[in-house]
Structures are given as structure tokens and as C-alpha cells.
Amino acid sequence: MPEFSKLGDELDKELIVVSCLLHDLAWSKNKEIVTNTRRFEVDGANLARDFIDSYPEKESTWDRKGRRMQLAWDSIALHTMEVFAPWKEPEVALVHYGIHGDLLGPSLHLLGLPEDLPNLKGVMTDEEFKEICNAFPRNGFADEFKEIFCGLCRDRGRYTFDSTVVHYGLEWGFDGKGTGKEEFNKFVEDTQRAKNLYKMMSSIDKLADEK
């Protein structure tokens, strides 16, 4: 991408590659390493940090409390956040673009996001993405992806509400086939933040009237 190519050796390319490779560790079905009390991106960032920290041959610059580790954590925790990641450090932004380029190619802008958000249009062509998909077929991935995100709605509940994930549960339930769809829709409606926040603030307003 033109805005990053001028940085050259200033970019931490190893950090970008490592973060891209480890970004979805929280999709694991191993209940011993994932939680249901955080967004999956945060779980993934924590797991990646632990993995890097435990690697015996890592460079000293990968200090657990150092800047590289923090950037790797940020890159993974924010990789789905198109309203934040592009304005963070270049490494964080490039991990975001790399992951979405792998997922959707040059079509990220077709998701209905604001038109002024940075995207991959003009960076990767449809023909280039087609060549990648031919070289690395992923038949059935859309259904697998749907099943994973619906499972996150089932297992993580309210920790999906402020992300794209929630829409999978609302549309396809807990298994991608409609199971639990009505239950999840009611759960989301009953815990709607704007509605509940308004009730709370209205109650506080009434406290002044009681004097």
C-alpha cells in the first residue's frame, strides 16, 4: 500500500507476519485455553502473547512488556476493528489489511462500511485475488466461517454484541442452521445498551426531582 511502502525498513515485518499467523487462535475448541468472558479477538491476542513469550528462541526484543509485544497484541485485538486499526501504528494497520485481504480480497469496501474508510480497492485486483484462490482453494470456507461465528454467539453471548459476529447469531442462530435464533434475538433485544442506558439515565434524572 503506497502510504506504507515508503516506510521501508522502519516497518517491523516479522511482527506483521507473526500477528497475521496467530490472529485467530481463539477459534480453538480447546476449552482449556479459551474463555467465554472476552471478545474472541482479546482471547486471541492473549494466546498469541503467551505463545510468543514461551518460544525459547525468540529475540530479546520480544519482551513480554515491551513495545513489540504490545504492538502484536494490539494488532490481533483490533484486527476486526476497521474504525480503529487503520489509524493505529503502521504494523497494526497492515495486520488488519492483510487479514481482510486474505478473507475478502479487494472487496472489503463492499461490506457497507463508510466510503471514507481506508480499504484495499486499487491495491489488489480481482484477477490477483482469483489467482490466489485458485492456488489455495477454500471451498466451503463461507459455511465454516458462518458456523464459527454462530458458535461464538452461542458461547460468548454478550461479548459479541459490539461486533460483526452478533449479526451471524441474529441471522443463523447458534449453529448456522437456525437453532437458537429466536432465543438469541430476544437476548440481544433484552440487553440493548441504548435502551438500558436511557432507563438508567432517566432514573438518575428523577433523583433530582425527588429533592
Image (spheres, rainbow, N blue to C red):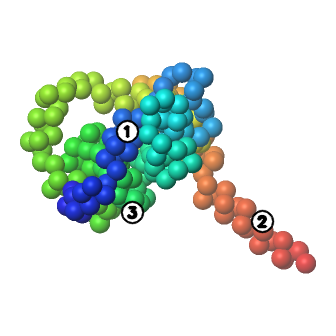
Q: Amino acid type of disc 3?
A: Trp
Q: Eyeballing the image, is 138 above or below 100?
A: above
Q: Observer-nearest residue: 171 or 136?
A: 136
Q: Residue at x 39, y 53 (%)?
A: 92
On screen, residue 135 versus residue 179, left or right, reads left
Q: Earlier in the sequence, mark 2 or mark 3?
A: 3
Q: Secondary structure at mark 2?
A: helix
Q: Amino acid type of disc 1?
A: Val
Q: Which mark is residue 87?
A: 3
How far, Cα to Cα, is label 2 from label 3?
A: 37 Å
Q: Residue at x 80, y 71 (%)?
A: 206
Which residue is identified by label 1?
18
Mark 2 and 3 residues: CB-CB less than 8 Å, in contact? no
The residue sitting at the left extreme is 127
Q: Earlier in the sequence, mark 1 or mark 3?
A: 1
Q: Observer-nearest residue: 65 or 149?
A: 65
Q: Position of residue 110 (x, y in %)?
A: 25, 51
On screen, residue 83 versus residue 117, left or right, reads right
Mark 1 and 2 residues: CB-CB less than 8 Å, in contact? no
Question: Which of label 2 and label 3 is nearer to you?
Answer: 3
Q: Earlier in the sequence, mark 1 or mark 2?
A: 1
Where's the N terminus, which quadrant? bottom left
Q: Amino acid type of disc 2?
A: Ser
Q: Secondary structure at mark 1?
A: helix
How far, Cα to Cα, is label 1 from label 2?
A: 49 Å
10 Å neighbourhood of mark 2: few (<14), some, or many (≥20)?
A: few
Q: Residue at x 19, y 27 (%)?
A: 136
Asked which quadrant contains residue 195, the reply is bottom right
Question: Which of label 1 and label 3 is nearer to you?
Answer: 1
Which residue is identified by label 2?
203
Query: Can see residue 73?
Result: no
